[in-house]
Structures are given as C-alpha cells and as structure tokens.
Image: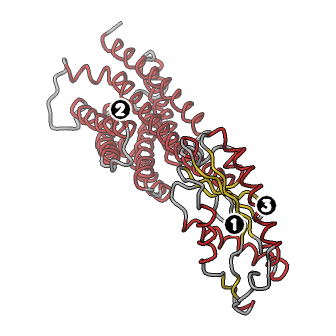
C-alpha cells in the first residue's frame, strides 16, 4: 500500500470513528431532550450535532470514493466530478450549520437569544459560503481552508459567551465547555496553518503533515469533550430546577404545617400543636403554671350580632392576651371559646387575679358602624393550677379546666345587674 493510500486509510478510520461518536452524541441528545423539553438551547445543540453527523457522513463517502481504483474514478467523472463537489458542498454546509447552531444554542443559554431569526439569515449565507468553497477547488484541503475562518469566529464567540457568565450562573459545565470552545478555536487556527489558509510554509513532513493526517482523531477528542461539557450544563440546569422545586416544596410544607398547627382565626397555636409538643420544650424543662380561659359573653355576641362579630371578638381577645404575656409563655386555642395558657417558671399565686385584672382593664372591642359603633367588653372565666415537672402537664390542665368551670359557675351565681358585662 502506498504512503498516500496509508494516509487516506488512516483518515478514513478517523472519520468513521468520528461519525460513530457523533451519531452516538445525536442519540444521547435525542434521549436527553425528552427530559428537558423546555430547554430550547439544548435542543438547538442537539440539532447542531445532527448537522455535523450529516457533514461527517458526506466526507466519509467522499473519502471512500477517493480511495476507489483509478479506473472507476475516471469512469465516474474523475476526482473533480459533480458527485465529489456535491459531497464536499454538503460537508461544508453541514459543518457551517453545526457552527451556526452552536452559536445560536450558546447565545440562547447565556443571553436568551432569538435563534429562529438568526437561523433564517445564516442558512442562506452558509449555503453560499459552501458553494464558494467548492468552486474554489482544492478538494478537502480547500474546504478546510474555507471553514477555518467561520470556525474560529464561532468557537471563540461560544467560548466568550460561556466564560463571561456571572458567577451566579457559572458552574463546572459552563467553565469546562467554554474552555473546550476556546481550545476548538485554537485548534482551527492550527488547521488553517496546516492547510495553507495562513501565510505559512508548512513542511510536507513533521507536525503540520501529521496534523492533516490525524486531524480526524484530534477532532474526535475535542468533539467528545464538547459534547460531555454540554451534557454537564444540561444536568446542572436540571439540578437547579430540582433544587428550586425542593425549596418551593419545603416552603409549601412549612406553610401547610403552620396551617395545621396554628389557629387561622386567632393566630394562636392549636390543640394539635400541643399534642405534638410544639412550643413545650422550655415548659417541660421547668416548673410552671397552667391557665384555662373561657369567654363568658361569646355566645351572647354570636346570638345578637352573628358569628362574624363573635370571630372578631375571639381574635381581639387573643391579641390582647398575647400583648400581656411573656415571650416564653405559650397560648393555645383549646377549642371554641376556650384557651390554654402555659407559663413556664411562673408561680400560681396571684396569676388568676393578675390576668383577670389585665382583661378587665383592656379596652372593649369597638364594633363597626354597621352595628352602631357599639363597644363589647371582654368577659371571661379562668382557672390556674401549677405543675412541677413535665409528666404532670396533662393532669394539671384537667385541674385548671375544672377550676375554670368552677369559676364560671361562681360568676353565674353571683351575677347582678351591676356586674353583668353590657354593651357600652
């Protein structure tokens, strides 16, 4: 086998390997696209690999033709036949589309670029450029010379887009892919020198000759790194979406948990919160006092003004009580018009009297103009009992509840026209 044929065989194997690897990348992008339908930049990159696959396929066919017996080549029109020109034109056009789609996808990822308008302009220009490349002659070497300038521009632009992203958007994938784009641009500068597009006099032997012979393998490595970097970018975007969804789910769960543990009307913790031990960490670590409170005039307000005003009275009572208690005290809406107040570290002596005095001194609730602006005072019964350790809390609550009902019965027996809570 002659040296020329050996070089052609080496180039053909490199091209076949590049074609297989590119086809594999196209398949991976098609599969990954199913899981990222909203990432149009990734779809555009996938279309770019499809264009490159077609371009490499065309040059593989052209190389096989060049290795055919001379008699067959002569019979089919020679090395400059329309078939060869068409395959070269298809290869150049496919590579130019590959470059254009890379730029479009990268600009979409980094800048939100409108790729459709860009593609309508670039496609005819790519076809015209491919026609000039083939008309200029020189075969594959001539086509490489024509491809060098747009390749350097496109790869440099993509690298600049990714490497200049702000740190909030930059990650391993963008930095790696940007660096690979820059390496591609430098590689095509070397191709330009090897194929005579630059004012150099490359030696027929040595580095420049080896680069033209083995450039398919160099391209293969560079393209695999590029595809790998793009996959990382897509996976990083997917991870960010998962992190955002997880954070939103966490907020939603916190909101739902708050709704489950807090009374929506009064803003107090509810009985479920008590059952789950919410707010009881400090209360269970020391002695304290338990107070049960029950509003005496809620039913009367509901009957006279309706439940909306009764709800307003409940909320007002809770707000007044929260203003008077300590930050470490815990107020629970126990049910209906009953409230539970747990006061860690507080002695029971005088608690009931102080709370009764605070409630009696509180300003009455002023109703809306629809009810004549009348004022409804706060009236309640309460019972206070002490506990010395955590396991006594349930029994202490029962005792405080019984004390509160005893206070309510006492109030009813001692009620006189002078001390009945009335509308003012």
Q: For the point 53% across and 47% down, which residue is it?
A: 244
> Which residue position is annotated with label 2?
139
Classed neighbour count for the residue bearing mark 1: other residues with Cα under 10 Å, few (<14), some (14–19), many (≥20): few
Q: How far apart are marks 1 and 3 (CA)?
A: 24 Å
Provide residue 253's location: percent of width, then percent of height: 63, 48
The mark that comes first in sequence, 1 or 2, is 2
Q: For the point 53% across and 50% down, which residue is it?
A: 345
Label 3 element class: helix
Label 1 element class: loop
Residue 320 lies in quadrant: bottom right
Residue situated in front as seen by the camera: 192 or 157: 157
Q: Do the residues labelled 3 and 2 touch (CB within 8 Å)?
A: no
Q: Against 402, is 9 above or below?
A: above
Q: State the quadrant of the C terminus.
A: bottom right
Provide residue 374's location: percent of width, then percent of height: 71, 89
In front: mark 1 or mark 3? 3
Left or right position of 63 against 322: left
Q: For the point 37% across and 24% down, which residue is it?
A: 221
Left or right position of 299 against 38: right
The mark that comes first in sequence, 1 or 3, is 1
Residue 63 lies in quadrant: top left
Provide residue 264's location: percent of width, then percent of height: 68, 63
**Which disc number belongs to residue 19?**
none
Classed neighbour count for the residue bearing mark 2: other residues with Cα under 10 Å, few (<14), some (14–19), many (≥20): some
In front: mark 1 or mark 2? 1
Residue situated in front as seen by the camera: 195 or 108: 108
**Which disc number belongs to residue 405?**
3
Q: For the point 74% across and 90% down, which residue is it?
A: 370
**Which disc number belongs to residue 265?**
1
Q: Do the residues labelled 1 and 2 touch (CB within 8 Å)?
A: no
View extreme (top): residue:
1
């Amino acid at each position: 086998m002659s040296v020329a044929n050996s070089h052609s065989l080496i180039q053909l194997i490199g091209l076949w390997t590049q074609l297989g690897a590119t086809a594999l990348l196209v398949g991976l992008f098609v599969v990954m696209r199913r899981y990222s339908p909203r990432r149009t930049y990734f779809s555009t990159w996938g279309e770019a690999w499809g264009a490159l696959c077609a371009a490499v396929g065309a040059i593989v066919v052209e190389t096989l033709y060049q290795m055919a017996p001379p008699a067959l080549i002569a019979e089919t029109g020679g090395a400059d036949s329309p078939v060869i020109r068409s395959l070269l034109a298809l290869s150049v056009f496919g590579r130019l589309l590959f470059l254009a789609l890379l730029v479009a996808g990268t600009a979409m990822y980094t800048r939100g670029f409108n790729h459709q308008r860009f593609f309508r302009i670039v496609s005819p220009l790519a076809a015209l450029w491919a026609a000039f490349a083939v008309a200029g002659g020189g075969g594959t070497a001539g086509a490489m010379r024509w491809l060098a300038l747009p390749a350097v521009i496109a790869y440099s632009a993509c690298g600049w887009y990714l490497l200049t992203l702000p740190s909030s958007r930059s990650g391993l994938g963008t930095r790696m892919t940007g660096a690979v784009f820059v390496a591609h641009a430098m590689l095509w500068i070397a191709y330009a020198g090897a194929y005579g597009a630059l004012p150099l006099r490359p030696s027929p032997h040595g580095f420049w000759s080896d680069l033209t012979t083995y450039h398919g393998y160099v391209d293969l490595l560079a393209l695999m790194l590029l595809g790998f970097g793009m996959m990382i970018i897509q996976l990083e975007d997917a991870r960010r979406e998962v992190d955002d969804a997880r954070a939103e789910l966490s907020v939603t769960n916190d909101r739902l948990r708050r709704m489950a543990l807090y009374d929506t009307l009064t803003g107090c913790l509810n009985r479920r919160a008590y059952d789950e031990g919410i707010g009881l960490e400090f209360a269970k670590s020391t002695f304290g006092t338990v107070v049960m409170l029950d509003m005496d005039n809620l039913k009367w307000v509901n009957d006279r003004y309706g439940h909306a005003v009764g709800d307003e009275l409940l909320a007002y009572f809770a707000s007044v009580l929260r203003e008077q208690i300590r930050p470490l005290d815990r107020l629970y809406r126990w049910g209906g018009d009953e409230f539970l107040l747990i006061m860690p570290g507080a002695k029971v002596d005088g608690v009931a009297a102080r709370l009764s005095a605070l409630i009696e001194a509180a300003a009455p609730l002023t109703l809306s103009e629809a009810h004549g602006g009348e004022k409804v005072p706060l009236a309640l019964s309460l019972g206070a009992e002490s506990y010395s350790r955590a396991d006594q809390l349930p029994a202490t609550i029962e005792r405080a509840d019984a004390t509160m009902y005893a206070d309510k019965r006492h109030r009813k027996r001692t009620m006189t026209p002078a001390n009945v809570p009335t509308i003012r």
